[in-house]
Image (tube, rainbow, N blue to C red):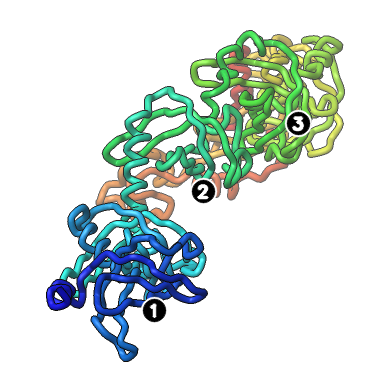
Amino acid sequence: MYDESLKQLQEGQIVKGRIIAVNAKEIMVDVGYKSEGAIALEEFDHPAQLKVGDEVEVLLESVENNDGLVVLSKRKAERVKGWEKLLTVAKEGDLVSGKVVRKVKGGLMVDVDGVEAFLPASQVFLRGFGNLDSLVGQTLNVIIIKVHKARKNIVVSRRDAMMKERDLVRQKVLDELEVGQVRQGVVKNITDFGGFINLGGVDGLLHITDMSWGRVGHPSEVISVGQKLDVMILGFDRETMKISLGLKQLVPNPWDQVEALFPVGSRIKGKVVSVMPYGAFVELQKGVEGLVHISEFSWTKRPAHPNEVVKVGDEVDCVVLGVDRENQKIALGFKQAEENPWGAFLKEHPVGNRVMGRVQHMTEYGAFVELAEGIEGLLHVQDISWTRRYNHPFECLKKGQEVEVMIVSADPENRKVSLSLKALQPDPWASIAERYPSGTLVEGKITKIAPFGVFIEIEKDLDGLAHLSELPIRLPGHLKRPGRRPAKSDKTEQAAPAATETGEAQPEAVISFLESQYKVGDTLQARVLRVDEEQRRIALSLKRV
C-alpha cells in the first residue's frame, strides 16, 4: 500500500489534502503521503476561515524537503488550474478581466483567473503614460494580445480594451442618432470655430454659427469646457463619424416674427455691436441685428468713418427703414430719429427766397455755399452771371466770402439745393439787344485771349467775342488752317514748331501769337456784328472798325 501511494503522487501534480492543524503562520495538510506538508497562511485569501478537517487542493512541489516534509503550494495549484482553464476559454484577442496585483519593471502584473499576466506600460493608457501606481489593486478590462504556452506567459493590453469599448459605445450612439434629435452632451474642447461636445463615447461639432441666433465673437462666450448642455443633431455621417450639432435650434428663430416686431417706420432702441467702414450694426434684440449705413447717420454731417459718431456698446435710437426676413437683413437710420433740418430750412426758405451764405469750397463746376449749419447749396458756374462766362468760380468768388443768392430748386430728401447769383437781377439780354444793334461801334478792354479769338468787355460784366476771322491781323501760315497736314513743298509749314504730328495747330501756339499782338487790359474799338439772345452771345469785329 505504501509503494502504491508513492507511485501515484508525482511532483507537479495537483492533489487534494485535508487540514490537520492550523497555527499562527501555517497549516498542516495531509495528502495521504508518508508525511504531511506545510503551507503558509499568506497563500490563502481568507486564512481566518480555515479550520481542521477542511479539504484543499494543492500542488505537490516536492515529495520531501530537508525536514522530511512534503512541499505543497496552494497558490501554485490555483495558478496551474487557472492557466489550464484560461487556455480552454480564452485566446489571443479575447477581452478578459483581471486585478492589478503589483507594479513591475516596464508595466504591471494582472491576475486573470489566478494567472498573472503582464501589462506593458505602453498598453495601459489610451494616450501617453500615466500613473501606474494608481492602478494597483484595481480590476481592469484587458485584451489578450500574446500567449506563450511553453513559458506559460500572457501579455495583455488595457489600451486595446479601452479602444474596443469606445468603439462599441460609439457604434451604439451612432445607431441611436437621428436628425432633429436632442441629446445631452459635455463640452470637451473649444476652438476658434466652435466646440466639440462628447455625446457619450462620440464627439460632435457645435459650430460657432449654430450656437446662437445672435452675434458670437468667440465660442467661449457661450460654452465652457466641462459644461453639460442639450444640443440638437443637425446631421451625421456614420462612415466618417462626423456629427453636426446645433444649440440655437432649440429656441425659436427670432427672424420669423421680425416684420411684426419691427415694422418699417417704427422707432426703436438698440445697442451698437459692430462698427465697419460702411456703417454700424445695431442689436435690436438677441439674435436680430440691423445695419445703419453711413449715409443714414446724419442729415447734415458726412463722417469719414462711422467710429467718429458711434462705438461698440453705445445705446442708440434708430428708425426701421426696411425689413428683409428672407435674407435676415434690416435697414436702419439714425438721422430719421431726428427732425430733417433740410426740410425745416426749406420750409422757412422756400424756392425763390433770397438767402445769405458763405462760400465753403469750390470746384470747376461751381461753388458750395453754406446756408445754415450743415446745409449747403450749389452755385453752379453758369448761374453766377447773365452776361459773363466764367471758366471757374474762383474768377469771381473767394473761399469764406459772404454772398447773397437765390434758392432756385430744392430736394430735401436727397439734401440738394441749387442756388443762383444771377437770378437776383433780371435777365438783361432783351435790353442788350436793343442797346447794341448790328453795326454799333463800341469801345472796351480786352478781358481774355482764347485760341479762337479775343473777349472784349463793352460794359461792366458784358463781354463780346471778336473771332479770329474778325481780327485785323493775319495768322502765320502754319496757324491758319488747323487740322491740315502741311504739304512737303511748304517749307514754312514743315518747319512750324506749333504743328503737331497730324498737322493740327496747338491752341497754346495760337494764344501765344495773339498775345504778341494784344494784351489783356488793352482798350480797343469794335463793331457789333450781332447779338444772340438765345445763346447770350455778342459777336464783335475789330477789322470792320
Q: Amino acid at mark 1?
A: Lys
Tag of residue 281 = none
Tag of residue 105 = 1
User: Disc 2 to disc 3, how far (Cα)?
Assistant: 48 Å
Asked if labels 1 and 2 touch by Cβ distance under 8 angstroms, the answer is no
Is 128 situated left or right of 376 in this image? left
Q: Percent position (x, y) of residue 395?
A: 72, 37
Q: Which residue is mark 2?
A: 189
Compared with 55, 212 (above or below) is above
Q: Earlier in the sequence, mark 2 or mark 3?
A: 2
The quadrant in which residue 467 appears is top right
User: Disc 2 to disc 1, how far (Cα)?
Assistant: 35 Å
Q: Is 211 in front, or is 353? A: 211
Q: Is residue 459 visible?
A: no
Compared with 173, 83 (above or below) is below
Q: Tag 1: Cα neighbours inside 10 Å, few (<14), some, or many (≥20)?
A: few
Q: Is 243 in front, or is 291? A: 243
Compared with 110, 463 (above or below) is above
**For numbered disc 1, what is the local secondary structure?**
loop
Q: Tag 2: Cα neighbours inside 10 Å, few (<14), some, or many (≥20)?
A: some
The quadrant in which residue 437 appears is top right
Asked if labels 1 and 3 touch by Cβ distance under 8 angstroms, the answer is no
Q: Which residue is mark 3?
A: 301
Q: Residue at x 30, y 66 (%)?
A: 17
Q: Earlier in the sequence, mark 2 or mark 1?
A: 1
Q: Is 296 in front, or is 314? A: 314
Quadrant where the C terminus sits is: top right
